[in-house]
């Protein structure tokens, strides 16, 4: 059994990025823990005032907790850095938030964002995770994987230096895919109508595409950032 930490920038990123894989790994009796760094709301309004949006923020966190139950996560925690403004926060503060959770859990595996996503919060989250998991003596993290976020990863300008090219595939069953789609459906404010990448139909199509890429029915694709064997 492994202890797994999923570090996401916003509520719903954890499901979009690795929801079906979390469901599969949970079913295999691994511990799944989720850390959400950003509050995920205030950038949609003119003023970054979380007090005025308290009810909205509480509802989003409730959705995240319910989604976590569907995919079998053991815990979920929120840090509430300002949405889409991680570049206004000291990188050290983000690192310390990740390190605090990592030191508490001592995970063997970490999933997080792709380094070159369009979203600045995703980029900073990746940097914080990589810094927090420096391969020093007594470091417990042996594997780090980056996931893709529909409507962020593929919307970045694609070049040989920043394109998301999966190097690890986790095959998933219909059951795990349904768990991901059901969990995402809980995020009523985040899902969109097809053909938006965050529509439920598009998530199924992406799982099918990643699957047929490796001769399977369904899969989720990841970039191996580090794997120590």
Image: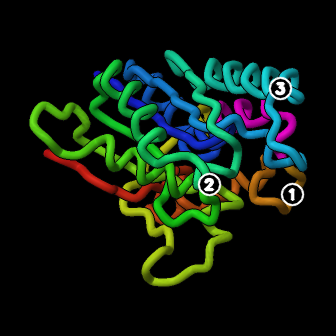
Task: Report the residue at 67% width, 57% height from top.
Answer: 150
Residue 146 x/y as whole percent:
44, 53
Q: Quadrant of the N terminus?
A: top left
Give residue 194's mark: 1
Rendered location of residue 193, percent (x, y): 89, 53
Look at the numbered disc 1 and give the secondary structure of its residue.
loop
What's the CA distance linking mark 3 and mark 2? Answer: 28 Å
Give residue 116's position: percent from left, percent from top.
Answer: 51, 66
As drawn, 206 above or below 51: below
Image side of residue 150 versus residue 218, left or right:
right
What residue is shown with label 3? 51
Give the position of the C terminus as an image quadrant: top left
- Chain part drawn in magenta: 178-191
Q: Earlier in the sequence, mark 3 or mark 2?
A: 3
Residue in front for this viewpoint, 204 or 48: 48
Asked whether residue 2 is in view, the answer is no
Label 2 element class: loop
Pointer 3: residues within 10 angstroms few (<14), some, or many (20+)?
A: few
Q: Is residue 90 magenta?
A: no
User: 197 above or below 188?
Assistant: below
Residue pointed to by mark 2: 149
- Residue 80, position as x, y percentages in the image: 64, 31
Q: How busy is the neighbourhood of tag 1: few (under 14 within 10 Å), some, or many (20 plus)?
A: few
Residue at 31% across / 24% down in the picture? Answer: 103
> Which residue is pictured at 45% across the width and 69% down the height?
165
The span from disc 1 to disc 3 (Cα, nearest Å) is 33 Å
């Amino acid at each position: 059994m492994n202890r797994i930490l999923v570090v996401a920038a916003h509520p719903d990123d954890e499901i979009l990025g690795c929801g079906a894989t979390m469901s599969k790994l949970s079913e295999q009796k691994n511990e799944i823990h989720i850390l959400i760094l950003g509050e995920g709301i205030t950038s949609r309004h003119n003023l970054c005032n979380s007090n005025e949006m308290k009810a909205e923020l509480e509802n989003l966190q409730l959705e995240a907790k319910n989604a976590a139950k569907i995919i079998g996560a053991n815990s979920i925690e929120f840090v509430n850095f300002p949405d889409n403004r991680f570049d206004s926060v000291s990188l050290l503060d983000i690192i310390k938030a990740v390190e605090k959770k990592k030191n508490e859990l001592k995970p063997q595996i970490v999933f997080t964002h792709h380094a070159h996503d369009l979203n600045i919060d995703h980029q900073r989250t990746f940097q914080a995770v990589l810094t927090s998991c420096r391969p020093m003596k007594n470091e417990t993290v042996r594997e780090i994987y980056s996931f893709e976020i529909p409507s962020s990863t593929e919307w970045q300008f694609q070049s040989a230096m920043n394109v998301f090219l999966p190097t690890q595939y986790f095959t998933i069953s219909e059951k795990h895919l349904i768990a991901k789609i059901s969990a995402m459906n809980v995020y009523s404010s985040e899902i969109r109508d097809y053909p938006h990448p965050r529509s439920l139909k598009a998530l199924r199509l992406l799982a099918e595409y990643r699957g047929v890429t490796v001769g399977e029915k369904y899969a989720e694709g990841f970039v191996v950032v580090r794997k120590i064997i």
